[in-house]
Image: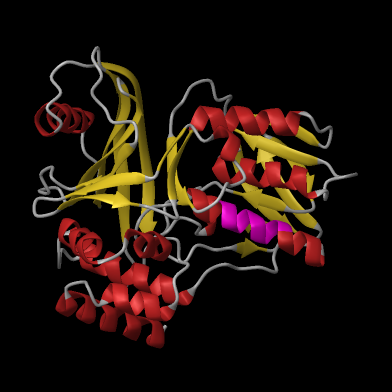
């Protein structure tokens, strides 16, 4: 019952496909507090529009050499709080007798000749299809694959006096020290006195909790110039950024979410890719009676992701410099469309032509040769 599982459950409910079926939702624990935040962009209302906590039509990009307030139209940058998402989805499925919910430790998932088996709390449960969003172990990375982490710690802070412009978010601020690797902060204002400040890195290893906290404190006090504030909420997360080819299907088991390769390798963005995947699964069930017929992966975009991971993993170019080139020389609409894997080849060539040519050319050739030889 993570983002992928609950997204699928809600859309199944709305699809008209569940009459006469029994659907089991399994999770480790009841969600009682907000422990994560999803940010994404859309050009129109999405399936979870009524729980969008805040949205912005303008967002700042900052680096040491370039700053700009971006006009995001036709996109809106949206934020959903984890607790709102879980409560909404559970309220939706609880209205349907077709759904059962259990909590405990998921021990294994196994394919069988006529379905799949979930083992949980030492009990085996059988189903026709099993949608698995659990990464039971770290992928075994082979030569030519990369495995970075997007890790982040966020504070929701409150000030006594109005400080934030609620109409302007910060999409990326690369002004913090880059000594640990690609490092940026984003700022999501909720009101003139409240905002989420998220310190984010793309690196191979995590920091100590003290270093995340120190970096947040320094950014708020030195970069934002805010000396007095109260921390009212904290969150921490880790997202794999890898070109490892996750196994999509194992017989009657379909892997979804990050476990199914739905996290964009070069950015860590997941929420919108989960929603696209959910639409594909529902479409497949309607068309063929099984969830396996659609695949929204694109080898072209996988190659782009691998090229960037190659550059970041080998420190060929700072992530801050890459994103500065991208946002300084391109329309924000085209960048967001590209990051959503929705651009045409001609649009992609124009974007790529604005990046430092030699590092990307070398990495592109290297990744292209791997694909030819694999």
Closer to the camera in the image, 36 or 250: 36
In percent of the image, x 84 and y 32: which residue is there? 97
In percent of the image, x 58 and y 57: which residue is there? 276
Placement of 206 over or under 374, stated as above or below? above
Magenta stretch, residue numbers: 275-282
Residue 248 located within the stretch drawn in magenta:
no
Placement of 335 over or under 71, stated as above or below? below
Placement of 234 over or under 59, stated as above or below? above
In percent of the image, x 23 and y 14: which residue is there? 161
Q: In screen coordinates, is 79 left or right of 250?
A: left
- The image quadrant where one finds the N terminus is top right
Q: In screen coordinates, is 246 left or right of 328?
A: right
| Residue 223 in the image, given as x and y percentages of width and height | 12, 34
Closer to the camera in the image, 91 or 57: 57
Placement of 293 over or under 168, stated as above or below? below
| Residue 334 in the image, given as x and y percentages of width and height | 37, 65
In percent of the image, x 24 and y 60: which residue is there? 327
| Residue 258 in the image, given as x and y percentages of width and height | 49, 52
Q: In screen coordinates, is 186 left or right of 249?
A: left
Q: Would you say the magenta stretch is mainly helix, strand or loop?
A: helix
Quadrant in which residue 352 is drawn: bottom left
Q: In screen coordinates, is 183 left or right of 85?
A: left
Label tally: 0
| Residue 211 in the image, given as x and y percentages of width and height | 17, 32
- Observer able to see residue 313: no
- Observer able to see residue 355: yes
């Amino acid at each position: 019952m993570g983002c992928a599982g609950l997204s699928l459950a809600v859309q199944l409910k709305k699809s008209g496909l569940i009459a006469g079926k029994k659907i089991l939702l399994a999770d480790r624990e009841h969600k009682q507090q907000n422990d994560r935040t999803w940010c994404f962009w859309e050009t129109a209302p999405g399936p979870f529009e009524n729980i969008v906590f805040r949205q912005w039509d303008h967002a700042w990009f900052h680096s040491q050499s370039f700053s700009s307030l971006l006009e995001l139209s036709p996109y809106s940058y949206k934020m959903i709080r984890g607790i709102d998402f879980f409560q909404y989805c559970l309220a939706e499925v609880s209205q349907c007798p077709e759904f059962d919910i259990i909590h405990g430790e998921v021990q294994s998932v196994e394919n069988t000749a006529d379905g799949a088996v979930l083992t949980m709390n030492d009990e085996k449960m059988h189903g026709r299809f099993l949608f698995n969003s659990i990464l039971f172990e770290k992928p075994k990375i082979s030569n030519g694959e990369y495995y970075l982490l997007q890790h982040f710690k966020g504070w929701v802070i409150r000030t006594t006096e109005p400080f934030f412009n609620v109409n302007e978010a910060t999409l990326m601020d690369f002004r913090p020290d880059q000594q640990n690797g690609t490092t940026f902060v984003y700022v999501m204002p909720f009101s003139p006195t409240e905002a989420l400040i998220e310190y984010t890195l793309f690196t191979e290893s995590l920091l100590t909790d003290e270093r995340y906290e120190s970096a947040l404190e320094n950014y708020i006090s030195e970069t934002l110039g805010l000396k007095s504030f109260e921390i009212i909420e904290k969150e921490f997360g880790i997202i794999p950024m890898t070109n490892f080819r996750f196994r999509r299907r194992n017989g009657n088991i379909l892997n979804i979410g990050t476990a199914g390769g739905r996290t964009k390798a070069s950015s860590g963005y997941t929420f919108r890719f989960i929603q696209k995947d959910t639409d594909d699964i529902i479409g497949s069930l309607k068309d063929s009676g099984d969830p396996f017929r659609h695949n929204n992966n694109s080898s072209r975009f996988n190659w782009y992701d691998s090229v960037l991971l190659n550059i970041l993993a080998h420190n060929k170019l700072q992530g801050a410099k890459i994103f500065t080139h991208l946002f300084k020389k391109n329309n924000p609409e085209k960048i967001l469309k590209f990051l959503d894997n929705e651009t045409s080849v001609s649009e992609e060539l124009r974007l790529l032509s604005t990046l430092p040519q030699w590092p990307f050319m070398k990495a592109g050739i290297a990744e292209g040769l791997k694909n030819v030889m694999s």
